[in-house]
Image (spheres, rainbow, N blue to C red):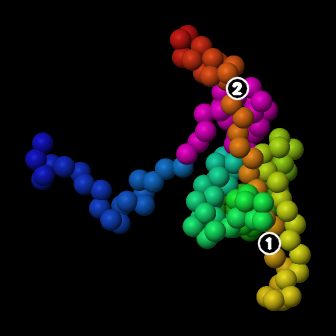
């Protein structure tokens, strides 16, 4: 193959080739089987926001990474209704995957601060790995 036939990724297309990471345990893990597809997608989108948090040093006093993602931002990004955003966040909370810390009025800014969101690490069990490979052998 020569250079004229090579399909180079150009700077304006580089963004289009970026992908979200989707943890396989959300599909194969027995503890996540009851999560809706929207909640799984929501977890992935929220997890992607952690990179932004680290760049901004959004780490609390206990060294836990948090992020800010308002319901309106999720509505705009996903094309979901506010009701669906709230339902997805509640589902993630009920599964123990999302914790929302309510922030209050900040006298310095004169505004109510948005909630801090914390994601839980996904739990991977040996049976999840076995399930994945067992399904591939059929």
Is residue 109 magenta-colored? Answer: no
* Residue occupying image coordinates x 74% and y 51%: 119
Residue 125's disc number: 2
Toward the front, the furthest residue is: 62
Toward the top, the furthest residue is: 138
Q: Element at badge 2? A: loop
Can residue 135 be seen here? The reply is: no
Q: Give the range drawn in magenta.
A: 21-40
Give the quarter of the figure containing the C terminus.
Answer: top right
* Residue occupying image coordinates x 78% and y 60%: 62
Can residue 15 be seen here? The reply is: yes
Label 2 neighbourhood size at 10 Å, few (<14), some (14-19), many (20+)?
few
Percent across and percent down for residue 116 are 78, 65
Percent across and percent down for residue 85 are 77, 57
Whether residue 121 is situated above or below residue 134 in the rendered picture: below
Camera-nearest label, 2 or 1: 2
Q: In terms of sequence position, does the residue under pointer 2 or pointer 1 come before the other?
A: 1
Label 1 neighbourhood size at 10 Å, few (<14), some (14-19), many (20+)?
some
Q: Are marks 2 and 1 in contact (CB under 8 Å)?
A: no
Residue where numbered disc 1 is placed: 114
* Residue occupying image coordinates x 35% and y 66%: 12
Q: Quadrant of residue 40?
A: top right
* Residue occupying image coordinates x 70% and y 64%: 59
Q: In which quarter of the image is residue 78?
A: bottom right
Percent across and percent down for residue 45 are 64, 53
Whether residue 112 is situated above or below residue 64 in the rendered picture: below
Give the quarter of the figure containing the N terminus.
Answer: top left
For the residue pair 125 and 86, the one nearer the viewer reads as 125
Whether residue 33 is situated above or below residue 109 in the rendered picture: above
Is residue 36 magenta-colored? Answer: yes
Percent across and percent down for residue 2 are 10, 47
C-alpha gap between disc 2 and disc 1: 34 Å
């Amino acid at each position: 193959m020569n250079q004229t036939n090579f399909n180079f990724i150009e700077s304006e297309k580089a963004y289009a080739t970026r992908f979200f990471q989707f943890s396989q345990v959300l599909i194969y893990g027995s503890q996540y089987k009851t999560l809706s597809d929207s909640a799984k997608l929501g977890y992935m989108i929220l997890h992607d926001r952690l990179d932004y948090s680290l760049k901004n040093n959004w780490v609390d006093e206990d060294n836990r990474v948090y992020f800010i993602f308002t319901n309106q931002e999720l509505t705009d990004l996903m094309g979901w209704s506010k009701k669906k955003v709230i339902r997805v966040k509640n589902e993630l909370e009920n599964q123990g995957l999302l914790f929302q810390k309510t922030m209050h009025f900040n006298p310095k800014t004169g505004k109510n601060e948005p909630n801090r969101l914390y994601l839980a690490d996904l739990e991977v069990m040996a049976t999840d790995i076995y399930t994945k490979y067992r399904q591939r052998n059929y």
